Image (cartoon, rainbow, N blue to C red):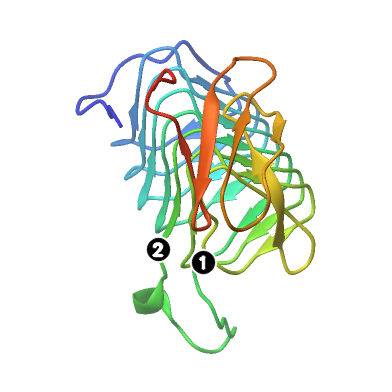
Amino acid sequence: MNIHDTPAEPQAIHPSAIVDAGAVLGPGTRVWHFTHVCGGARIGGGCSLGQNVFVGNDVVIGNGVKIQNNVSVYDAVTLEDDVFCGPSMVFTNVYNPRAGIVRKDQYRRTVVKRGATIGANATIVCGVTVGRHAFVGAGAVVKRDVPDFALMAGVPARQIGWISRFGERLALPLSGSGEATCPHTGDVYVLRDGICTLAPASHQP
């Protein structure tokens, strides 16, 4: 990620939004109605924070990230470049919360890697890593790490396939070995021992 180290004037902050002193926002980032960005947050360029978004202090957001309406990005969450967070999806940071017990020293870190999509109303239980260009379907509840390029659905979420960077489902088995081509880009994906990768000849962003 290329997070800017000094504050830069974002393209647009709606008058109803609150951006606390100390927050770092990259150029071209847009902050929409009723959104609150805490002072410790570091947000890259070209991002869009929709209506009623909350971004905590201990949060790092890369470039080109799109966060739709009603999403709270709590402390201990990192979103790498080009992540998409669908409307009303949920992050957590405490695994076993109780109202009468303070567990702020027990936050579990969550990382969403480059290009991943999290669908509307999905929940990401803290402490997991969502792999590069993975796709978490709407309403899914993710409790375990998600592999790169994995297509996830259900409660709890399970892998139902593989998906390309462009968002096209790939004709690959869930396990074993195989090779598939994205019908839109022509990129070739190789599956070996349950790990999906781009073939070396494919363009690497």
Numbered-mark total? 2
Is there any visible trace of residue 205 in the rendered image?
A: no
Quadrant where the C terminus lies? top left
Classify residue 114 by image quadrant: top left
Percent x, y of residue 180: 62, 32
Q: Secondary structure at mark 1?
A: loop
Percent x, y of residue 178: 59, 44
- Taking the image as shown, residue 60 lies to the left or right of residue 94, namely left
- Residue at 41 percent across and 44 percent down: it is 38
Q: Secondary structure at mark 2?
A: loop
Q: Mark 2: which amino acid?
A: Arg
- Taking the image as shown, residue 93 lies to the left or right of residue 62, namely right
Quadrant where the N terminus lies? top left
Foreground: 172 or 18? Answer: 172
| Separation of residues labelled 2 and 1 (CA atoms) | 6 Å
Percent x, y of residue 26: 35, 21
Does residue 146 lie above or below 68 as drawn?
Answer: below
Foreground: 102 or 146? Answer: 146
Does residue 78 lie above or below 141 as drawn?
Answer: above
The residue tagged 1 is 126
- Taking the image as shown, residue 183 lies to the left or right of residue 79, namely right
The residue tagged 2 is 109
**Cβ atoms at labels 2 and 1 below 8 Å apart:** yes
- Residue at 47 percent across and 23 percent down: it is 64
